[in-house]
């Protein structure tokens, strides 16, 4: 049996590959890992089953320092964003087989438009699915408090965007106070979406009554914001029970998260300005309300004062009229009483005169003057002879004197 050595096999494979891959080819794949070492970039490339996400192919690739410098000069820092973990790329590779080191792919160029196009498709898919499920605009239907002072912040603790956000809030001239709870997460990379979703679940379960949730991060390229186009993350935010305010630091592009958030602003500082402005507007409204109350109160006091003066004058006039009327009645009643009692007195005087005349006419002295006499027996007057006792002395009184006799 004829045997072939490993070197011979690898040398044969080298010739076969060199013969069949004389020119570099464009390769579509996903980057599962990337690292920079000594000026070179080393990548792990994979292809996944669309239905199961299982890896069905895998290989290693390299960008040598010379090519890396050329690509960096051409694309800038966006190159490293595209060649990050989780990105789908279309790269031009030179297929090389070495007898000792085996198969290797040497990256010569990167098709940026492919990656950007894939991101656009992902974004379009997420938006259409959110709309088809009827949850695209749920956040905007939530009521945002007039003053937002206690809120949860999802961000990276060391991120410049978060620092700018909190600094801007706490240095406000009006000295508004804010209760800020930071929930730190990775704000880019393959794990960002999942971490943010888990954090939203933690916030919902918290016992604190937050006014809103704020998601902020510093600036970055379109690739850095890939997580914010993720459908599952955006669905979690759309269904979130509290208003979500986003400020994820990009001036041109708008992520799906921006579209479905209750309020979307370009930068973390803009979010801080938004929160401060709501406080100012609320304070101005309070001042205006108190001013209106003061004006209404002053007007009402003035009106009541006028009414009181009018009522006082009316009462004064009414009192004078009543007093005058009472005085007139009193004078009338006095005159009536006077006339009445004058008549009564006159009547009584006439009666007295009559009685006086009667008394005078019945006075014994008057009667005696008329020739009448009074006969007394034992000091008691008698008017009939039968009353006289013959044994007693009778005394007869005349006008001008009296005599004593005895009855026969």
Image (spheres, rainbow, N blue to C red):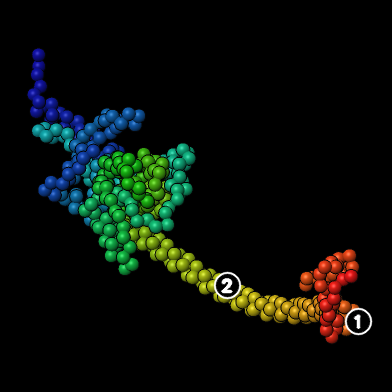
Q: Would residue 328 be found to the left or right of residue 210 on screen?
A: right
Q: Residue furthest top?
A: 1
Q: Foreground residue, 284 or 369?
A: 369
Residue 311 coordinates in the image, percent (x, y): 63, 74
In the displayed structure, 355 sits above or below 163; it is: below
Q: Which quadrant holds the N terminus?
A: top left
Observer-side mark, 2 or 1, equals: 1
Q: Upstream in the sequence, badge 2 or badge 1?
A: 2
Mark 1, residue position? 371
**Which secondary structure, mark 1?**
loop
Please say whether residue 19 is visible from this viewpoint: no
In the displayed structure, 158 sits above or below 400; it is: above
**Which secondary structure, mark 2?**
helix
Q: In which quarter of the view is residue 364 placed?
A: bottom right
Q: In which quarter of the view is residue 340 placed?
A: bottom right
Q: Foreground residue, 145 or 161?
A: 145
- Which residue is pictured at 87% across the width and 78% down the height? 373
Q: Which mark is drawn over residue 304?
A: 2
Residue 200 coordinates in the image, percent (x, y): 33, 43
Q: Which quadrant holds the C terminus?
A: bottom right
Q: Foreground residue, 14 or 403?
A: 403
- Which residue is pictured at 28% across the width and 62% down the height? 170
Q: Which mark is drawn over residue 34?
A: none
Please say whether residue 371 is visible from this viewpoint: yes
């Amino acid at each position: 049996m004829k045997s072939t050595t490993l070197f011979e096999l690898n040398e044969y494979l080298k010739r076969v590959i060199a013969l069949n891959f004389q020119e570099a080819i464009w390769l579509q794949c996903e980057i599962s890992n990337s690292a920079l070492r000594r000026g070179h970039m080393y990548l792990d490339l994979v292809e996944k089953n669309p239905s199961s996400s299982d890896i069905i192919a895998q290989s290693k690739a390299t960008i040598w320092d010379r090519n890396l410098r050329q690509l960096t000069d051409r694309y800038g820092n966006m190159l490293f964003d595209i060649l990050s973990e989780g990105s789908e790329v279309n790269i031009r590779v030179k297929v090389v087989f070495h007898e000792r080191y085996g198969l290797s792919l040497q990256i010569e160029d990167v098709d940026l438009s492919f990656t950007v196009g894939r991101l656009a498709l992902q974004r379009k898919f997420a938006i259409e699915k959110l709309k088809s499920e009827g949850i695209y605009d749920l956040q905007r239907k939530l009521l945002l408090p007039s003053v937002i002072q206690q809120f949860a912040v999802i961000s990276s603790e060391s991120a410049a965007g978060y620092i700018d956000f909190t600094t801007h809030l706490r240095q406000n001239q009006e000295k508004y106070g804010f209760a800020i709870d930071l929930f730190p997460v990775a704000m880019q990379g393959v794990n960002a979406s999942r971490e943010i979703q888990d954090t939203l679940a933690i916030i919902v379960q918290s016992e604190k009554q937050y006014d809103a949730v704020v998601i902020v991060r510093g600036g970055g390229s379109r690739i850095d914001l890939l997580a914010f186009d993720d459908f599952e993350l955006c669905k979690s935010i759309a269904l979130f029970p509290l208003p979500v305010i986003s400020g994820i630091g990009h001036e041109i592009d708008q992520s799906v998260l921006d579209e479905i958030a209750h309020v979307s602003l370009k930068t973390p500082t803009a979010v801080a300005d938004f929160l401060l402005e709501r406080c100012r507007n609320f304070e101005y409204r309070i001042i205006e309300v108190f001013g209106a109350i003061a004006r209404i109160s002053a007007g009402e006091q003035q009106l009541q004062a006028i009414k009181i003066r009018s009522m006082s004058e009316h009462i004064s006039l009414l009192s004078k009229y009543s007093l005058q009327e009472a005085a007139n009645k009193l004078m009338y009643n006095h005159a009536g009483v006077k006339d009445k009692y004058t008549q009564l007195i006159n009547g009584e005087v006439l009666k007295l005169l009559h009685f006086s005349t009667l008394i005078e006419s019945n006075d014994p002295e008057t009667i005696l003057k008329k020739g009448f006499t009074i006969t007394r027996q034992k000091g008691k007057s008698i008017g009939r002879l039968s009353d006289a006792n013959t044994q007693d002395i009778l005394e007869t009184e005349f006008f001008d004197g009296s005599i004593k006799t005895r009855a026969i």
